[in-house]
Image (cartoon, rainbow, N blue to C red):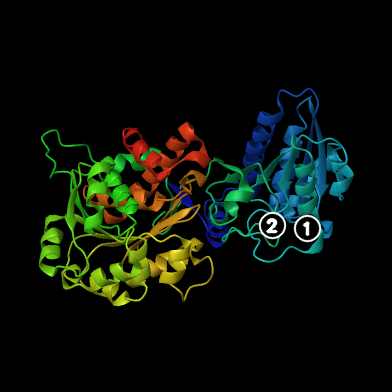
Amino acid sequence: MSLIFTEEEMRSYEGYLMETLGIPSLLLMERAAGYISKKVFEHIRQLADAHVVVVCGCGNNGADGMAAARLLAEYENVRISVVQIGDPSRRSESNKIQAQILEHMGIRITYDPEEVLQKHTDVIVDAIFGIGINRDLSDVYLDAVRSINAYREAHSDCYVIAVDLPSGLHTDLGIPQPDAVVADETVTFGYPKRGILLREGRRYCGAVTCGGIGIPQPDSACADRVMEWGEICKLMPKRDLLGHKGTFGKVLCIAGSAGMPGAAILNAAAVLRSGAGMVKVIGVSQNRDLMMQAVPEAMFVAMDDEIDEEALAAELHWADTVLLGSGLTKERAGAFLKSTALKDCEKPMVIDADGLNALAEQKKFLMARKESGRITYLTPHPGEFRRLFPETEPHAEQQPDTVRGLAKEYGVILLAKSATTLVANGDKIYYNAMGSDALATAGSGDVLAGALAAVVCVINDPLMAAVYADILHAMAGRAAAQQSGNAGVTASDLIRALPAVMQR
């Protein structure tokens, strides 16, 4: 799985490459420029007369852009315009060298993007800033960013490629400062940066490619990681040829309420489609017939009004994994959390939906499970996250250090759902950028909770079980969207897609 870096980590690593390993910065720059020019040429190679505008800053990102402009100038069908933004007297040493080379080649550097963007432009290369933006842009840079965006919006055939990160996007938080270049593609180097995957970064970066520039793998002991399905799908153990239904796990879903049977139905169906051998639902009696019609393979235990402690303890003893909360009311979920049987339950537990809302007022339940070393999974969407952790800042579910810290504090594995879901325990964190708006449909979270409960039964590593389930859910969304389009996907479509995705 790919590593993902913060600004500080990337600068430290670049220092290691140059100062410890002795790799010259100009060599790294030349390799980056080669990759940029290759990506640009892929887009324009069939054009008879292509115009490429490279907009450069005064630092090393701008130097990368200038070096790419030099390489692109070698192609007969490419006209190059280079624009520099900022005070030339503040150029970095590498920037000065690249500017001198362009001047010696007769490639003019201008200082007004409006001057060159008046002509037809096929590709704009944004090389104003790379990493390092953590404050609002000053006027000259903000004007340049907005000029690029305005031209792109007015000319749908113009393709914008950002170098390392769209200029104006916060490297670590993925938020515009206060605006950022809207790129069709972002070409980053070495390893992705946090801002590419978090918050608005997904919108501003467009397609993301990570260019290999011949740098060695760093020590990855403490680095964040990006989920990759091709590697993660191998986590699921092979089915035992001699196995029976008990071999592959028994899941107990405490789900559904009067008038809300759907969540329990989706839970149970997702459990079975994700490989578990057996599923049982504890719910209100009026949901029994609907459950049996929708998922006849499921078992059902009616528990109305008062919680039967003895019966609940017996069902918890039967299960390998427990799922609590989908389709329950907050009051009903809270009653289960207060029950002696659930407090004594040693089985891995997935808490979702109103289970999370009730848990916000019963944090002692989590702390008791932490102290006894029991495994607990929390699956909040942004609203549930804020209710569960009201002390955190806005958008804390997209702040990796906060998510990891909360997982450690409460002794849980936390799946903070968003466009990029963060999955963390108190040590490691994984980013799932494979999700799409196909998952933005009612019941999608119930499917994830069911899939997670099933997977926990067979993958021994608790964190990796969560990682597998989360990306399985995302890949099911992509598969379902191929049939229905992103806007037409339903939670039932996700469930139908799960088995085929698991076979890949």
Secondary structure found at label 1 = helix
Quickly name the residue at label 2. 168
Quadrant of the image for the C terminus? top left
Secondary structure found at label 2 = loop
- Amino acid type, label 1: Tyr
Spot occupied by residue 246 in the image (x, y as percentages of width and height): 12, 45
In this picture, residue 374 sits left or right of residue 158: left
Q: Which mark is residue 141?
A: 1
- Amino acid type, label 2: Gly
Packing grade of label 2 (10 A; few <14, some 14-19, many >=20) is: many
Q: Nearer the viewer, residue 201 or 358?
A: 358
- Is tag 2's residue or tag 1's residue first in the polypeptide sequence? 1
The picture quadrant where one finds residue 327 is bottom left
Q: Is residue 164 visible?
A: no
Circles 2 and 1, Cβ within 8 Å, touching? The answer is yes
Looking at the image, which residue is at 65% across and 36% down? 34
Q: Is residue 191 visible?
A: yes
Quadrant of the image for the N terminus? top left
In this picture, residue 459 sits left or right of residue 218: left
